[in-house]
Image: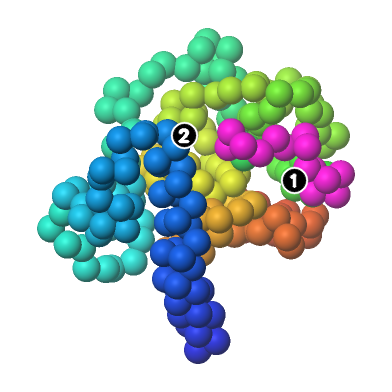
Amino acid sequence: MTFWQRMYNSLCFRFEDLAHPIYFILKQQKLMESLFPEAKNWPNLEEIRRNVSLVLLNTHTTLGTPRPYAPNMIVVGGMQIQKDIEPLPLKIQTFLDEAVKGAIFVSLGSSVLITKLSKNQFNAIVNAFKSYQNVRILIKSDEKITISSHKESDILVEPCFNQQSILAHSRIRLFITHGGLLSKTEAVHFGKPIVGIPFYFDPHFNMKLAEQKSFGISVPIETLNAGNIAAAVDKVLSVSR
């Protein structure tokens, strides 16, 4: 990071360090005592926060940056990944098996609906595939989506996919994601490159690390347009031919 980026980080950390005990802890203390009357006899939240016996960290050394951990901090990132991958429904299995030129999986997580994006943002995503008319597209969406550059038979839209089973399939060439930590972990585990569209909070950080480690490209929602999302897709697919 540049000097100013490091300065910004330091100021944010200092602000949080000051605001946490005088604002957040007080509000949470009141909430705890309202829900648990006996909590008035417990140590206050600040003491509890500083007396932790075990911390399970939902990350992994291969995905982050080197940092020292105390003995009570255990890295468990990837524990959600199944040892035995569940078989795909026949419809999806056939769709992917017949994807001779490969397939792209588009899922923006459970909290972002692709059809609720602005018109320009939505069109930027669905038009990013027009140079790859022989590549099949799977899209997580509650509503039907058509892509003008593709035949209807080459598009599969479902409200829910078994993400791990999809990523495990050999025909998947690219995963377009919101950049959530679990999605990033699963993509790395199954060896699938990602184009991330981070909307908020930690996905921005996750995708910065993905770019540093060269397994993903970040296209933040604030800068999403037809040109940069298409360029990101083209860069990944040109490498994964």
Q: Residue at x 66, y 39 (%)?
A: 112
Task: Report whether residue 187 is seen.
Answer: no
Badge number at residue 167? 2
Count of picture labels: 2
Q: Residue at x 16, y 54 (%)?
A: 72
Task: Using the rendered view, name the quadrant where residue 149 is placed.
Answer: top right
Badge number at residue 3? none
The answer to whether marks 2 and 1 mark residues whose Cβ atoms lie closer than 8 Å is no
Q: Is residue 62 above or below residue 160?
A: below
Q: Residue at x 55, y 24 (%)?
A: 161
Q: Amino acid at mark 2?
A: Leu
Q: Amino acid at mark 1?
A: Ile
Q: Which residues are magenta?
A: 109-122
Callout 1: few (<14), some (14-19), or many (20+) C-alpha neighbours within 10 Å?
Answer: many
Q: Which residue is at the front of the view, 93 or 2?
A: 2
Q: Which residue is mark 1?
A: 125
Q: Is residue 10 above or below residue 131?
A: below
Q: Residue at x 37, y 34 (%)?
A: 36
Instruction: Provide the secondary structure element on which disc 1 rests.
Output: helix
Q: Is residue 52 left or right of residue 64?
A: left
Task: Report whether residue 113 is seen.
Answer: yes
Q: Quick check: is 189 in the magenta stretch?
A: no
Q: Residue furthest top?
A: 90
Q: Residue furthest bottom?
A: 3
Q: What distance separates the C-alpha of mark 2 from that of mark 1?
A: 20 Å
Q: Which residue is at the front of the view, 223 or 132?
A: 223
